[in-house]
Amino acid sequence: DTAVSQTPKYLVTQMGNDKSIKCEQNLGHDTMYWYKQDSKKFLKIMFSYNNKELIINETVPNRFSPKSPDKAHLNLHINSLELGDSAVYFCASSHRISSGRESTQYFGPGTRLTVL
Amino acid sequence: QKEVEQNSGPLSVPEGAIASLNCTYSDRVSQSFFWYRQYSGKSPELIMSIYSNGDKEDGRFTAQLNKASQYVSLLIRDSQPSDSATYLCAVLTGGFKTIFGAGTRLFVKA
């Protein structure tokens, strides 16, 4: 069984379009994340949800809007796509152990977004 | 100063040698530290986690943490060609945000 799944795996679209990426985890974790990995392979956090509440919201254009309908799902909607949005987007999940500690983050397979 | 710094490499070692990967971080209150391995075109996967000062060994891998020096390292003994990948250092900061380093590319030559 896949622990963290993302759909779609590949997404090719035109500038200006709106698209969504979905993520689901079946690990029972309470925290989920969206990361962006650019062409230089730098992995940067975008958002994090703990028990459906947004706890991390990095400096990301407001064209990006996450939504967590429940603890097992975290979706990412992107409006008015731009060329610079082309990257691989990873979803991840973890469990918060205690103050200052976190379990391993498990990553989904990634969604390669190409904006033409 | 970047929050988590790694030498981007590439680091090239012969098969059977010890590969040493280093990482420094800036947030002194960080308590959780991770090493992830990422093969090209794949997602990151955990190699080691370490929370206390000292060494932690798991098979051919040893993570070392020195909080006073804000330094984390990963040693890979008996390196194999299959260890060739990018190794990402990750630190859970005091703000409960996991920051990843830019990664070190490792090549193990057969």
Image (cartoon, grey):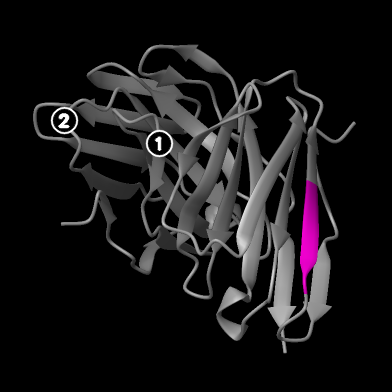
* Residue farthest along the right direction in this orientation: A1
- At a point 68% along the width and 57% down the height, the residue shown is B42
Q: Within the magenta stretch, is there residue A6?
A: no
Circles 1 and 2: CB distance less than 8 Å?
Answer: no
User: Which residue is at 23% across, 19% downward?
Assistant: B54
On the same chain: label 1 and label 2?
yes
Q: Which amino acid does label 2 sit on?
A: Arg
Q: Is residue B40 visible?
A: no
Element type where label 2 sits in the image = loop
Q: What residue type is labelled 1?
A: Lys
Q: Mark 1 points at which residue?
A: B97
Q: Position of residue B90 (x, y in %)?
A: 40, 41
Q: Nearer the viewer, mark 1 or mark 2?
A: 1
Determine if residue B87 is in view: yes
**Could you say whether the residue bearing mark 1 is in a helix, strand or loop?**
loop
Magenta highlight range? A18-22
Determine whether, in the image, residue B106 is placed left or right of residue A88.
left
Q: Going by the image, does A86 lie left or right of B6? A: right
Q: Which residue lies furthest to the top in this view?
A: A98
List the single residue furthest toward the left: B68
Chain letter for mark 2, please.
B
Q: Residues within 10 Å of mark 2 (few under 14, many from 20)?
A: few
Residue placed furthest toward the bottom: A116
Q: x%, y% of residue A114?
A: 72, 79
Along the line of sight, which residue is nearer the eye, A95 or A75?
A75
Dominant SS in magenta: strand
Residue receiving disc 2: B28
Residue A20 lies, with reference to residue A1, above or below; the image says below
Q: Earlier in the sequence, mark 1 or mark 2?
A: 2
**Residue B67 in which image quadrant:** top left
Task: Give how far across and how far down residue A37 sits, in percent.
Answer: 55, 63
